[in-house]
Amino acid sequence: MTLRLAAIFFVGLFMSACDDRNQSAEIGGGLDDKTLQAATTPAAYYEYLWCKRGDNWTQETSMKFVADWNAEIEKLENIVQGAFGYQPRGETDDRFDGLWALRWADKETMTAGWDEYEKAGINDRLQEKYPDHLTCGNTAGQDRHGFVTYQPLEAPEGFASELPYYLENNFCGYKEGRSIDDFRPFMLEQFIPYIQASKAQGMYKGYWFLVGVPDGVSPEPGDFNWIHFSTSAEESARDNMIFENSKGGQELQAKMLEILDCSEPRRWDGYVIR
């Protein structure tokens, strides 16, 4: 569900909103403490690895490769919390055939985990067992990109119980003369409360999102990456239609366009690897 909007949650800048909630916002009416905490505290550190398939790649071999990879990293002390494969839908990119997304508790765990992984020789063993199968980036800022990531909305119960699930992402930046001071009240006082209220009425059931702030070199122009999740592409299209044809959605979209420039959404099928 794209909603044609985007968000960024810099901890220090957003903390002031916690003590000054505008209960008379034009759309929505403030957030509960749990959501405010989620919007102002990083949930995880995500890395996105650009991956290329080799001549020996097959779906069957990929399943065996993932099983062996999981068995190997279970032996490490600093273990990645989750891993996901993102396959582009339609649009191709010369830089990669797909992405591996790694969810770490924080950057420190990520650094320690990679150090353990390399010292253990895991990649060498996997490449020897599965030659010319899959090669994923491991150079930060080139083919491996890190993001401090926030999760203001919880994933719906049972999300990803059926694969693939669906996601879209936009890279967004502030328009000239605009800043976080314009966007902060819009997001905390209007957008999130609107989505929460809509969910309470039975809409946007499968929707949730992550917001990633680039840690270092961003792979695309923009100040932040907004990733939207839905159970399926069909659900996302239906939710977008509802949003774009509703009065509240149109008002939110118009306000967003005054603040942000966002890329066109890229579309992906998502798979749980770990």
Image: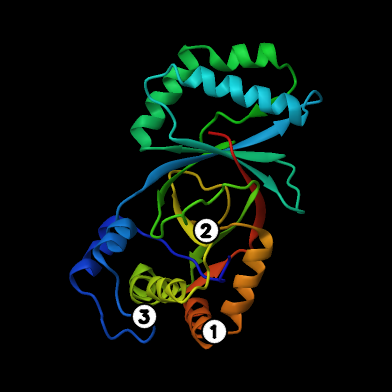
- Sequence order check, earlier mark of 1 and 3: 3
Disc 2 to disc 1: CB gap under 8 Å:
no
The structure residue drawn at horizontal position 53% and vertical position 51%, both measured from the top left corner, is 159
> Which disc number belongs to residue 124?
none
- Identify the residue position indicated by label 2 in the image: 222
Badge 1: few (under 14), some or many (20 or more) residues near its Cα, within 10 Å?
A: some
- Give SS at disc 3: loop
- Identify the residue position indicated by label 1 in the image: 250
Amino acid, disc 3: Gly
> Which disc number belongs to residue 28?
3
In this view, the residue in front, 131 or 182, is 131
Amino acid, disc 2: Gly
Residue 69 located left or right of residue 110: right
Q: Where 18 falls versus 138 (above or below)?
A: below
Q: Where 61 falls versus 39 (above or below)?
A: above
Badge 2: few (under 14), some or many (20 or more) residues near its Cα, within 10 Å?
A: some
Q: Where 47 falls versus 213 (above or below)?
A: above
The structure residue drawn at horizontal position 52% and vertical position 73%, both measured from the top left corner, is 203
Residue 77 percent location from the top left of the image? 37, 20
Mark-to-mark CA distance, 2 and 1: 24 Å
Amino acid, disc 1: Gln
Residue 22 located left or right of residue 225: left
Residue 66 percent location from the top left of the image? 61, 26
